[in-house]
Image (spheres, rainbow, N blue to C red):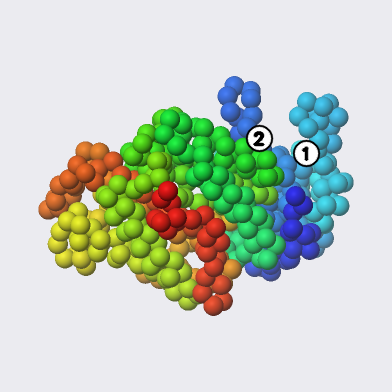
Amino acid sequence: MPNPVRAEEYAQRRAQLLEKLGQSTAIFRSAPQAIMHNDVEYNFRQDSDFYYLTGFDEPGAVLVFAPHHGEHQFVMFVRPKDVKAETWSGRRKGVDLAKAQCGADAVFPIQELDEKLPDYLKQADRIYYRFGQDEGFNATVIRHWRKLMRGRQRHGTGPMALEHSGQLLDGLRLIKSPAELETLRRAIAISVEAHNLARTLAKPGLYEYQIQAEMEYHFRRQGAMGPAYPSIVASGDNACILHYVENNRQLQAGDLLLIDAGCCVDYYNADITRTFPVDGRFSPEQAILYDLVLAAQTAAIAAVQPGNPFNSYHDAAVSTLVDGFLELGLLQGDKAELIKEEKYKHLYMHRTGHWLGLDVHDVGSYKHSAEEWRQFQAGQVVTVEPGIYIRPGIEVPEGQPAIPERWQGIGIRIEDDVLVTPEGNEVLTLAVPKQRAELEQ
């Protein structure tokens, strides 16, 4: 499926970045080639910032943005064409094609980085760079910065500070363009189909990995790159493990099955969770807790509105859950104090959601300062995913009641992807049923 993000949009993103830079230089490194074992490599996955600015999908590359430079404001360093290397490891775009496709002012072989980089740094007042997993390149940036700092006394110019490039780029990435939303909707549509398929297939006797295999087969069959993250297919008390990925248990009658899975399309990610009974019927305890989680999610989604602080939807979910816990006797005490002291966290221990986009947990701060939360804006996408997890043998905070055994071993999460709109919000994942009546047979 063609990438709906056109060259003009990448150019617009770079122009916005260059305007923010002023007299500074920004450096972006492509993702390192990760090793699976010994000399076997994982499939390459480009760094999200790098891809956001270029759509260029190769390792061994560097971007430099230097608006103060007299000749080149956007510069790339890439792997040169190499027939022998390409025979073993696949085609490279090389210098000329990278320049034509990405519209850089100059493109050089990556081997010339050390020689040419100082020319784009020496007039800068600071360097912006996001330290990543490539420790060798992290050291390269620091080495050049230190050398220029030492020369500043003689030359009077050079970067005095090294700062996080997320200060410039994260805010841009938070607001999704129409083309980005088109790609995200495609990833969500495929993921919705896979969840609905899984619900029809699940039955006692199957293994969690069989459900996982069918979903991930559907991802690839429909043109997705693959899973957006390791799929969670958790039956029974495995659902009480937030990031359970073993997926090796056999489904049993009476189990709930929690599936947290989504696919990736052109690096944009879906993230959906549903919980349903394997044999088609909730037990009374499962039904009560499920309805409580759904009520918490409904309250949280209602709080995702432009102008509301980011924490408002988590607060709405927690308030609803604590009301339910008090009514069920799973908590005792004053509601406000229980929330302030987080006495509910043995039952609900995570936040209610996160930004979603090129990264599953997408970039962008949740707070502007220690006291000020970022406000929701149209074009942002968040997940809304409250849950309840009552582990077998659960330990409770001091002063709280022991949890009766009939509640133990139940894990429930419901997660939707929600777009902030000028008028309110749009739930992008509604086509996966979540009302209890829809899940029972």
Task: Count every numbered label the image shows and give the total.
Answer: 2
- Taking the image as shown, residue 25 lies to the left or right of residue 214, namely right
What mark, if any, has residue 79 been given in the picture? Answer: 1
Relative to residue 272, is residue 340 drawn left or right?
left
Q: Give above or below for 53 relative to 210.
A: below
Neighbor class of circle 2 (other Cα within 10 Å; few <14, some 14-19, many 20+) is: few
Residue 279 placed where, x, y %? 40, 41
Q: What element does badge 2 sit on?
A: loop
Please tell me which residue is depicted at 66% across the width and 38% down the height of the picture.
44
Q: Residues within 10 Å of mark 1 (few under 14, many from 20)?
A: some
Label 2 is placed on what type of residue? Asn
As helix, strand or loop, the secondary structure at mark 1 comes to loop
Q: Residue furthest left?
A: 399
Q: Quadrant of residue 203?
A: top left
Residue 182 badge: none
Q: Residue at x 56, y 76 (%)?
A: 422
Q: Between marks 1 and 2, how big is the CA–CA gap?
A: 18 Å
Using the image, determine if residue 320 lies above or below residue 242. below
* Quarter location, residue 32: top right
Q: In the rendered view, does 78 fall on the left or right side of 97?
A: left
**Amino acid tagged 1:** Arg
Q: Is residue 386 visible?
A: no
Looking at the image, tell me whether mark 1 or mark 2 is earlier in sequence order.
Answer: 2
Residue indicated by mark 2: 43
